[in-house]
Every structure is written in C-alpha cells, then in structure tokens.
Image (tube, helix red, strand yellow):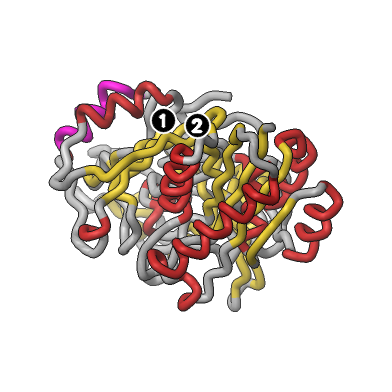
Amino acid sequence: MRYVIGVDDHDSPKGGCTTHFSLLLLKEFHRHGIKLVGYPRLTRLNPNIPWKTRGNASISFVVETDRDERELLEMVWSESVNYVEKVSQGLAYRRSPGVAVGKAEVMGKLEHLYWKAVGDVVTVDYVNTLSERLGILTRGGRGVIGSIASMGFSGEGTYELLAYRAQENWRSRRSIDLSSLIEYDESHFPRVYANVDYVDMEPLVLSHGNDPVLFGLRGRDPASLMEGMEMIKVDEKVDGYLVFVTNQGTDHHFRNPALRPYSSFVGEVTVNSVKVERGGDCVVLSDEAVILVYKETGELNRAMRELLPGDRIRVYGAVKPSVKYGIVVEPEKVEVTALVRKVEVKNPRCPLCGSSSESAGKGKGFRCRKCGHRFFGEKVSREAERGISLGIYQTRKYRHLTKPIFYSD
C-alpha cells in the first residue's frame, strides 16, 4: 500500500525543526523497510499568519509499505513525541506538533485545503472534520493543520537541498566560504536562485538560530543542488542532507487574494500621494489600499519613492492590521503599469546671456543670476525624466514563497 504522511510543528527556539525531524523519520523508515516514493514535500503555508513558526513549513511524503495505516501512525507519533521531548523541547515553547497518515489517493481530495492554507486562515476544527470524512488518521494538536494541508500540495514546484549540522554545533556560529558560494551560484544561474545577496554581498543560504539546518540551496532541479554539495565550502562537517520538492518560489500565496488581515493581496491601484516616514519607510496612499514599503526592502523602497499622483501600480503583498491606517499592504513586489508625465516649470533664461534667472519680486519680472539684467517673460514648462520606469520591482529580501522576477511562467 502507498500512504501519504504529514508532519508539522516540531521546532522550537531551543533547537530542532520539522525538516530535521523528517530526515530522522525517513532514516527510521529505511531501517524498517518502509520505502520513500518520490521526493519529500516541503510546503510553506500562509506567511502572514502571526502565530506561525519561523518558516511556517510543513512536510509530507509518500511511502510504500506492507504495514497498515494505524501501525504507521503509531510509529510516526512515537518518533514525533521522542523528537519533541528530547531534541526540540517544543512543548516548553507552546509548540503543538501534529502528524497525519492517509491512503495516497486522498491527496487529490486535499488540494482545496492546501490552497486555503497557503493564503488564508484554517482552523483545527475544520481540519479535524475533513480528516474524519476522508479517513485520515491524526495524532497531536495544531500541527495537524499543516500536516494535512501539505498532503494536498499541488501545482508547480521548485527544490531545496537542506544540509544539517551535528548537534554539538547547533549553538555555534555558522560559517560558509562566500567565494565558493558565489562561484556555485553564478555557474548554475538561473537554475538556482536566492542564494546570495549581491548588493550587500552576503550569503542567503545560512540558517539562523539554534536549529539543525546549516544551509539551504534553492533551485529548479535537484541535480544543480547536488552539485552545490561538491562546490560549496563550510567550516564544519555536514551531518546529512535532504532534497525536498517545495512550493517555494511559486507565488502560490497570491492565487486567491483578498484585502483582509493575514491574507495576501494582489490588485492595481492609483497613487494618490507618497510620503517617506522618519526612518525611511515609504507610504503609498491610494483609494484602494495603504501600501507600506519598509526601508529594508532596498530597491523596492527606493522605487516607490519615485511614484507620483496618478501613477498606476499592481501590488503583490501581505495584508496586515495597522493601528495608524486600519490595514496596510506590505508588498513583496510591485509592477508599475502606467506613469504620468512629470512636468517641471522653470524661470525663463536671460535674453542677453542665456543664464538662469530668479524672480525679481511679485509683478517685477525676472533678474538674471549672472549679469543682473531685469526682464519680463513667461515661465517655461518642460517634461522631466522620471526616476522610475514601467516594470516589476521586487525586494531582494525574499520570502520563501515569492517567485523571482527572472522566472517566467
């Protein structure tokens, strides 16, 4: 029989993560003759949920075994409890791990749940009712939501290779040879993406905190990621790695947009005004939405400062509650679809020497800045260049689900 298994919520600030638990679980499966079918699936769910784990990732995989699903569930749950108690200590940090097991054919019946979980809010009660109706066996708490949602992952995908650290290194600083990472990234582009920040010249592949992940390589085919294991140099021994198929870099969270808190928004708006707040954040006001572009978004922030009233933009972003504005949209990328003409009005040139002039006073005409000649004339209007052009602008600080602009559909 083939079964689909989902796991979620196995991390904590103390250590551990759901992907690492999956690696250990698959090793245990191998020891018991349970065969993995295809790649494990790393599913990033709604990135706007405030109570999410850091990466909001859940895992699912298809296995082939002679065991029945209840026996399989107890085996997975036993490993889950052991991991949370001895490795991540997640219960002390209010983690609520969950696991699920179902016959492989239920995956197609869970696609609607996946699409809801990647862009909206899903409750435990809803998932429990659904699992009971479909005959999916579950154990645990809130993590059951991500576990079952991951079973329904469908559509296009990319790949990520996650390399893990030995446990004695979990609290030490990660280090990677940047030149070897850049050499790898440049030689495999565009089959790989979001591995280096070429503006700040920093690696984007390193994990942070006390979790077991050393680095993660993102790309469009597994072979390119495997080659990275040979090229990239690190200062410690890699204690295992796993390649996942994933919904990262797909924009799946924009499939069902809505302008409500914790959803993702996609919409075209007309700019009313732009203001730069103290600290550098940029606020774009429109009738449809308030767009808040943080200074940390770099190029996106600088581009939005160049907008003028009447410009049209298509915004892709997260909807968040705001004390000041009610709700705001925090964009991941913005497509400039139409620009108004920027007209500059200047004083006329001096008719004698051609130099610039200044006002000589109300009703007194103009005075040449160079020769002092006074004269009467009309101000001159001309179209000025814009500091922005039509096209897509994207923050270089990628969210997991954001599709890079150089990946065409």
Residue segment shown in magenta: 179-189
| Disc 1 and disc 2 in contact, CB within 8 angstroms | yes
Q: Quadrant of the C terminus?
A: top right
In the displayed structure, 195 sits above or below 6; it is: above
In terms of sequence position, does the residue under pointer 1 or pointer 2 come before the other? 2
Would residue 185 be counted in the magenta stretch? yes
Q: Is any part of residue 310 visible from this angle?
A: no
Q: Residue at x 47, y 36 (%)?
A: 244
| Near-viewer residue (287 or 366) | 287
Q: Position of residue 348 (x, y in %)?
A: 38, 44
Q: Amino acid at mark 2?
A: Thr
Q: Position of residue 207 (x, y in %)?
A: 32, 53
| Near-viewer residue (181 or 144) | 144
Q: Position of residue 80 (x, y in %)?
A: 52, 59
User: What is the distance, in whole Å, between disc 1 and disc 2 at their CAs?
Assistant: 6 Å
Instruction: Return the residue at label 1.
Output: 219
Mark identifier at residue 158: 2
| Near-viewer residue (29 or 336) | 29
Q: Residue at x 36, y 54 (%)?
A: 366
Q: Is any part of residue 335 visible from this angle?
A: yes
